[in-house]
Image (spheres, helix red, strand yellow):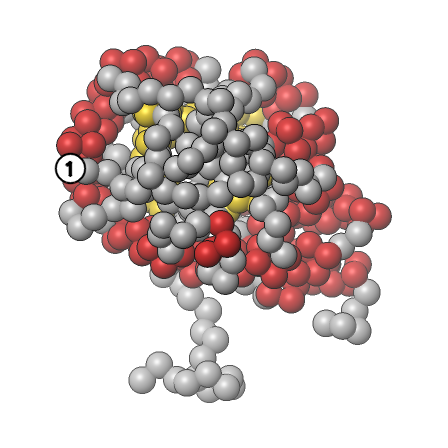
Amino acid sequence: MIDKTFDELLSAITTKALRGDPVDRDELLAVLASTDDDLLDVIAGAGRVRRMFFGRRVKLNYLVNMKSGMCPEDCGYCSQRLGSTAEILKYSWIDTDEAAQHARSAINAGAKRVCLVAAGRGPGDRDIERIAETVAVIKGSAPQVEVCVCLGLLKQGQADRLRQAGTDAYNHNLNTSAGNYARICSTHTFSDRADTVAAAKAAGLSPCSGAIVGMGESDEDIVDVVLALRELRPDSVPVNFLIPFQGTPLGGHWELTPQRCLRILAMFRFAFPDVEVRVAGGREIHLRTLQPLALHLANSIFLGDYLTSQGQPGRADREMIADAGFVIEGFDQPTQSARPRDLVITRHRGAGTTAPANT
């Protein structure tokens, strides 16, 4: 690989991804290390992959923050964390009718997925029942909408209950690499998060898990979390750009540029060629006027506001999608590739390798 020019390497990476073959660690690192002079070529290569599997469709997702603030965990990036002095809305659980009303407005505006989120270490059984009721009401009026739930670490049986209630997906981000995790959180571990994603998947929920970038991590950390995510085989991968809330430990981290964000999104697309890659929190403040270029890399975005920060107006999102030549994905269009990714796994052990055979 070191003998190749970057143009040759980018061509090889693009070809791999178009075939759906795994792009390796050094290649992903090379994308992150590429220069601004190479950026449009990187976007063009990753854009070919995006169009191959998703055409020009953009899936809209909408967040409903079921309760805000007062989380006992100490995640350094979060405005709802223990000890946060960020001036955010703080309230206890909203009721089912209010949540369903917000969901209906989002669906009417084009959202295909509604995400019900509540910060905390994990839900109690009463919280699970409250969410189950909300899911049932949303599904009762809009059966085609995807409902994703994000409640933290799950205990045994809770994922099954959510699935029985009609929940389609469960989100729990890995956020950063295993080696970097203790630097951003001490109240739970990287393994706790990975275990919850696995438990949700085992219960039949579509796994949604991604990362947060801009927290002082290295390129190696970003690629390591991508490879860890790839092992979990999520159906959707949100890419968050740190929103540096004053009053949190990472409130002074303004290290991202629009170009850096686009390289990161391109790297995620190469790593997950046929998986939903979602531009999530922080896109407006870090991508700024280059947001439309992100649509050539990601096939999914959040519509409107986030958990504790405001996004750009939903009308502006829809206009941006149209002006960039993309279309909003409808309920009758599949987000996921028709290929059964979990059934065909390329062998990387046994004969012809140095890894032990599967015996």
| Percent coordinates x, y for residue 58 in the rendering | 54, 31
Residue extending farthest right: 37
Res 194 quadrant in image:
bottom left
The answer to whether one can see residue 204 in this image is no
Of residue 325 and residue 190, the one placed in the foreground of this image is 190
Q: Residue at x 54, y 16 (%)?
A: 314
Residue type indicated by callout 1: Asp
Q: Residues within 10 Å of mark 1 (few under 14, many from 20)?
A: few
Please name the residue shown 79% across and 59% down the image.
7
Quarter where residue 325 is shown:
top right
Place residue 8 in its image quadrant. Answer: bottom right
Secondary structure found at label 1: helix
| Quadrant in which the N terminus is drawn | bottom right
Q: Is residue 341 left or right of residue 122?
A: right
What residue would you read off at disc 1?
Answer: 125
Residue lying at 26% horizontally and 35% vertically, measured from the top left: 167
Nearer to us in this view, 317 or 153: 153
Residue 99's x, y, as percent? 30, 18
Q: Is residue 230 above or below residue 54?
A: below
In this picture, residue 36 sits left or right of residue 106: right
Q: Quadrant of the C terminus?
A: bottom left
Q: Position of residue 331 (x, y in %)?
A: 40, 27
* Picture coordinates of residue 296, whole percent (x, y): 65, 37
> Image height check: is 65 above or below 75?
above
Q: Residue at x 45, y 74 (%)?
A: 347
